[in-house]
Image: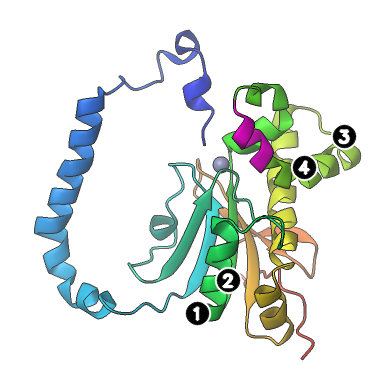
Amino acid sequence: MSDKDKQPLAASASASPVAETADAALQHIVDGFLHFHHDVFPQQEELFKKLATAQSPRAMFITCADSRIVPELITQSSPGDLFVTRNVGNVVPPYGQMNGGVSTAIEYAVLALGVQHIIVCGHSDCGAMRAVLNPDSLEKMPTVKAWLRHAEVAKTMVHDNCDCANEGESMKLLTEENVIAQLQHLRTHPSVASRMANGHLFIHGWIYNIETSEIRAFDADQSAFRPLNGEGPIPSATPKARF
Ligand SMILES: [Zn+2]
C-alpha cells in the first residue's frame, strides 16, 4: 500500500505518470497475459507440466500487498518456488485471534506442504506503516484500522524507545519493529512453534528497500538487522532448537 496515490496531484504533478484510463489499464494486463500465454509459457512448458499436479515450495513468503514488492522478482524465483501470502503491512495475526487467510496459509504451508522456511518481509516507504504512525489518516478505513492493530506493539516500541528526530527515522524503526512483532506472532502458531522447536522450520525477518533493492535481515543472535550481502552466515531470526 503506497502513500503516493494519496498525495495531492499538485504536489507530485511533475513526478507522477499520466493516469491510465480504466480500459487502458485492463488492456495492459490482458496484453501481458497474452504475451505470457503465447511466448513465455511455451518456453517453460516442462516446468509447468511438472507443476500441474504438485508443488513443493522452498519457502513461505509473507509480505505487504504493496505493488512495488514482487517476491519472485527480488528472489529470482520460479513458479512453484515460493508460497506467497500478502496483506496490508505484512501482518501475521497471533494464533487464535482470527481464523483468517494468513493463519490458514501458515498452517497449510507448514503442515501440508512442509516448508522449511517462513520469511516475513517488510519494506521501505510502506503506506501501512505510515498509517500506523498517523492513525487519523484511517478514519474512513475502519477495516484497515482494525487490521493494523496487529502492528500496535511496534508503534509502542518506537514511541517508548526512540528519540526519533523525524518521521523518516520513526518509519525505519517502526518497519523493523513491525517485522519483529510479526515474527513473534508467527511463533504463537502451534504448527510453527513445534517445528521450530525440533529444528525443522526456520523463520526470517527481512526488510526490502524499494529504492536500492537492498535487503536487511534480522539476526536473532545479535538482536539487529544485518545486510543480506552474501558475506558471512545468512542472518536468521530462529532461536536454537530444543528437541
Ligand atoms: Zn507496505
Query: Disc 3 designates what residue?
Result: 163
Residue 239 falls within the magenta-colored stretch: no
Which residue occupies 52% across, 72% down? 108
What span is in magenta?
141-147
Residue at disc 4, secondary structure? helix
Numbered badge on residue 174: none
- Look at the numbered discs 1 and 2 and tell me whether their residues touch, using CB distance below 8 Å: yes
Q: Nearer the viewer, residue 170 or 38?
A: 38
Q: Earlier in the sequence, mark 3 or mark 2?
A: 2
Q: Position of residue 37 (x, y in %)?
A: 14, 57
Separation of marks 2 and 4 at Cα, in angstroms: 24 Å
Query: Disc 2 designates what residue?
Result: 107
**What's the residue type where badge 4 is placed?**
Glu
Quick one: label 3, few (<14), some, or many (20+) residues within 10 Å?
Answer: few
Q: Is residue 114 visible?
A: no
**What's the residue type where badge 1 is placed?**
Ala
Q: Earlier in the sequence, mark 1 or mark 3?
A: 1
Which residue occupies 71% across, 73% down? 238
Point out the frontmost of discs 2 and 4.
2
Point out the frontmost of discs 1 and 3.
1
Image quadrant, ligand 1: top right
Query: Disc 4 designates what residue?
Result: 152
Q: Is residue 196 visible?
A: yes
- Look at the numbered discs 3 and 2 and tell me whether their residues touch, using CB distance below 8 Å: no
In the image, residue 129 above or below residue 178: above
Point out the frontmost of discs 3 and 2.
2
Separation of marks 3 and 4 at Cα, in angstroms: 18 Å
Q: Is residue 232 left or right of residue 65?
A: right
